[in-house]
Image: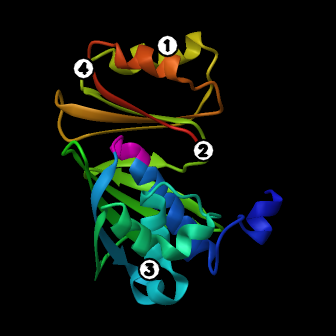
Amino acid sequence: MNVFDIIGPVMIGPSSSHTAGAARIGHIARQLLQDEPVAAQIVLYGSFAKTYKGHGTDKALIAGILGMEPDDARLRFSPRIAKEQGLDVSLSTGELPEGHPNTAVLTLTGRRGGTLTVRGSSIGGGNIVIDAINGMPVHISGQHPSLIVQHRDRPGVIAEVTDLLADQGVNICNFTLSRRQKGGVAVMTIEMDGGLDEALAAKVRALPDVMLCVTLLP
């Protein structure tokens, strides 16, 4: 435990869970989109849905989607800035039978026409977990350099990727794999202690069965 687990992150308030955590969810969703977002559909669940106006959760999510950090003084003005930058935002609330109470589902559309749906939860103290991308289970904490690798579900692909990381002296601290069906499309989520750079990501992208490789840096 460090001091930020006790007193909370540096942020524009009022809540580390409902404001800072929400901004981080939006920011990671923007990075995963790999494009300039032009539309954002935001659905809030649980406590997020009940208290978002008082805690500025909607403003924080929009700020993150715009690329702002939780301590950005512009966070409180993010809806106006979104309009000025041409980001069309729609917000609604829903019921979530299972899952963390501070949960948001973001569907982003990029300028090049691509879309991405991310489900994230704020778990306290500004910490977050992204647990689904386009309906596929993942685990992204945002606290470690990460690779999200979409690939064909074939024997040896995981070994090819992890061998590249081992050759660079990279230590994996968290690994998850999800797939919809055998032999279809699978997603690896790899969090590491350090050593991630664009050269390493490019080597992963060059593997024959890798379809997409996204890097996330904390």
Q: Amino acid at mark 2?
A: Pro
Taking the view exactly as shown, the residue that stands out farthest to the right is 3
**Measured Cα–Cα span from mark 3 to mark 1:** 41 Å
Residue 49 lies, with reference to residue 34, above or below; the image says below
Q: Quadrant of residue 34?
A: top left
Q: Is residue 141 magenta?
A: no
**Along the line of sight, the residue nearer the viewer: 188 or 215:** 215
Q: Which residue is mark 3?
A: 48
Query: Few, some or many C-alpha atoms within 10 Å of disc 4 (few <14, some 14-19, many ≥20)?
Result: few
Identify the image quadrant of the N terminus. bottom right
Nearer to us of marks 4 and 2 is: 2
**Along the line of sight, the residue nearer the viewer: 102 or 31:** 31
Nearer to us of marks 3 and 4 is: 3
Q: Does residue 65 appear to the left or right of 182 in the view shown?
A: right
Identify the image quadrant of the C terminus. top right
Residue 1 lies, with reference to residue 123, above or below; the image says above
User: Which span of residues is magenta-colored?
Assistant: 31-35
Residue 80 circle label: none
Q: Are marks 4 and 2 in contact (CB under 8 Å)?
A: no
Q: Which residue is mark 2?
A: 218
Q: Secondary structure at mark 2?
A: loop
**Measured Cα–Cα span from mark 3 to mark 4:** 39 Å
Q: Which residue is mark 1?
A: 163
Whether residue 102 appears in this view of the structure is no
Q: Does residue 4 appear to the left or right of 13 in the view shown?
A: right
Q: Are marks 1 and 2 in contact (CB under 8 Å)?
A: no
Q: Which residue is mark 4?
A: 154
